[in-house]
């Protein structure tokens, strides 16, 4: 039971049936909008069409090889702008520092140069994300009949509307400029960024500049939230378990020796970081973004194979964290084993399994099946790019006498503590990555 809706939480035996249900019967998009209180947080634009899903699936993911170097370049720029560079220990709040790194990289891929470095856009993309979650967490505390009234008086709600207006004012002229350039060019423009790809594959109705600008903000939310949360959790977990840092650094050095310096790495090179990938997955197991996933809203009544009735308008989900931490799925689930999945991948025929971005019947943080998160491969690459740079260029530790910062929970959502502090210092020049 949730205050905003009654929810049917189904057992894992139904995973394979649910993942093949067509969207005309069970809609993940309607459920996503419901979870994010879309009618009050400006997220309901994704109900108009599936342009966001198509662009991620058809354009972004297939082009990740071309996007790797721009992501690294933007991270290099971001690290210089956003992090202290001192050989002495300096306190930072990783939640906010990593937020800025992720926002800059995502902007580079979503908008391209030079707009990605516009400070107003960076503020819009980060603050919109923060205010959406503040709004939905507060609204879910109250009965549904109060939502319309509360949405008018909540500062986070009207700030969200203001950021959408600002985004349209900023992006619409750029969208029109690109549309005109595309129309007047004899050759197709080779612009490899999300906004141009959306313009390229959109229908006439979908290509309305105001809608594209709005959608760009919404997609930035998904990208920034996923990558920031996971990267911060990994930093907290590494600081709490420093014995894992040197083996991961050695893995990175081995890849440098075999593949060349970091700026020469391709997307496929990052797949060789199996220990880092394993640590990311274990960190996510301990710190999932949510306790529930594979959400669907039933657009039609449907009966499962055993006769279980899913009524029309029912909101269904699975308890993904409980499922993955069943001892039959994850032995000794209470033990943090950062190389758990690295070891599993050494078994015959399993090297392609157990990765951070792969989904399985009992590992459902990104969903499972045709409607699993289409941006998870981008998120995985973005997180690894950030972590490799931070792990190799900086030492970091928890404040003396303190353990890993406790997570914050709100409803089914889990967040890293935004006010927690780590101390960082720059490593010696010979230890850092060669840029």
Image (cartoon, helix red, strand yellow):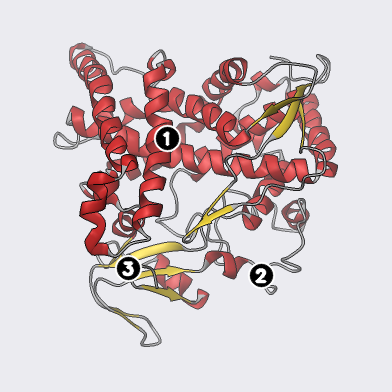
Q: Where is residue 374 in the image (x, y as percent from the top left)?
A: 43, 46
Q: Residue at x 34, y 45 (%)?
A: 53
Residue furthest left in the image: 205
Mark 2 element type: loop
When the figure is inspected, residue 341 is found, relative to residue 292, above or below; the finding is above
Q: Name the residue under label 3.
A: 5
Numbered mark located on residue 60 in the image: 1
Mark 3 element type: loop
Residue furthest bottom in the image: 307
Please identify, in this view, whether the residue under mark 1 or under mark 2 is nearer the observer.
Answer: 2
Q: Residues within 10 Å of mark 1 (few under 14, many from 20)?
A: many
Using the numbered discs, state the Cα–Cα distance from disc 1 to disc 2 in whole angstroms: 32 Å
Whichever of callouts 2 and 3 sits on the residue coming sooner in the sequence is 3
Quadrant location of residue 187?
Answer: top left
Q: Where is residue 268 in the image (x, y as percent from the top left)?
A: 62, 34
Q: Can residue 50 be seen in this view?
A: no
Q: Position of residue 42 (x, y in %)?
A: 27, 43
State if disc 3 and disc 2 touch (CB < 8 Å). Answer: no
Q: Nearer the viewer, residue 78 or 154?
A: 154
Q: Which of 52 and 334 is in front in this view?
A: 334
Q: Residue at x 58, y 32 (%)?
A: 98
Quadrant location of residue 125?
Answer: top left
Q: Can residue 235 be seen in this view?
A: yes
Q: Mark 2 points at which residue?
A: 329
Give the quarter of the figure containing the N terminus: bottom left
């Amino acid at each position: 039971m949730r205050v905003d809706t009654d929810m049917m939480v189904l057992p894992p035996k139904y995973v394979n049936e649910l993942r093949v249900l067509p969207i005309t019967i069970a809609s993940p998009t309607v459920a996503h909008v419901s979870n994010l209180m879309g009618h009050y947080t400006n997220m309901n634009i994704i109900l108009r069409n599936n342009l966001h899903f198509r662009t991620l699936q058809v354009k972004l993911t297939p082009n990740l090889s071309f996007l790797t170097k721009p992501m690294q370049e933007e991270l290099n720029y971001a690290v210089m702008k956003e992090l202290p560079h001192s050989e002495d220990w300096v306190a930072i709040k990783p939640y906010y520092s990593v937020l800025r790194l992720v926002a800059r990289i995502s902007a580079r891929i979503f908008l391209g140069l030079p707009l990605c470095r516009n400070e107003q856009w960076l503020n819009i993309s980060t603050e919109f994300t923060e205010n959406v979650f503040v709004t939905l967490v507060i609204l879910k505390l109250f009965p549904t009949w109060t939502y319309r009234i509360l949405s008018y008086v909540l500062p986070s709600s009207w700030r969200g509307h203001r950021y959408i207006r600002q985004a349209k004012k900023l992006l619409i002229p750029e969208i029109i400029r690109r549309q005109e350039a595309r129309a007047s060019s004899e050759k197709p423009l080779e612009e490899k960024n999300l906004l141009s790809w959306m313009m390229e594959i959109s229908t006439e109705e979908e290509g309305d500049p105001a809608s594209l600008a709005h959608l760009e903000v919404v997609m930035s939310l998904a990208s920034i939230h996923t990558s920031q949360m996971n990267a911060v959790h990994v930093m907290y977990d590494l600081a709490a378990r420093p014995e894992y840092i040197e083996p991961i650094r050695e893995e990175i050095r081995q890849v440098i020796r075999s593949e060349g310096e970091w700026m020469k790495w391709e997307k496929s090179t990052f797949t060789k970081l199996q220990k880092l990938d394993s640590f990311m997955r274990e960190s996510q197991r301990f710190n999932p973004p949510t306790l529930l996933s594979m959400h669907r809203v039933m657009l039609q009544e449907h009966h499962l194979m055993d006769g279980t009735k899913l009524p029309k308008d029912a909101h269904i989900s699975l308890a993904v964290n409980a499922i993955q931490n069943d001892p039959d799925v994850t032995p000794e689930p209470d033990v943090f084993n950062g190389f758990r999945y690295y070891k599993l991948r050494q078994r015959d025929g399993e090297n392609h399994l157990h990765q951070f971005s792969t989904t399985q019947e009992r590992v459902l943080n990104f969903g499972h099946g045709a409607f699993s998160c289409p941006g998870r491969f981008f998120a995985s690459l973005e997180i690894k790019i950030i972590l490799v740079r931070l792990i190799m260029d900086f030492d970091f530790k928890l404040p003396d006498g303190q353990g890993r910062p406790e997570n914050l929970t709100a409803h089914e959502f889990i967040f890293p503590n935004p006010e927690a502090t780590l101390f960082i210092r720059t490593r010696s020049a010979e230890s850092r990555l060669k840029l």
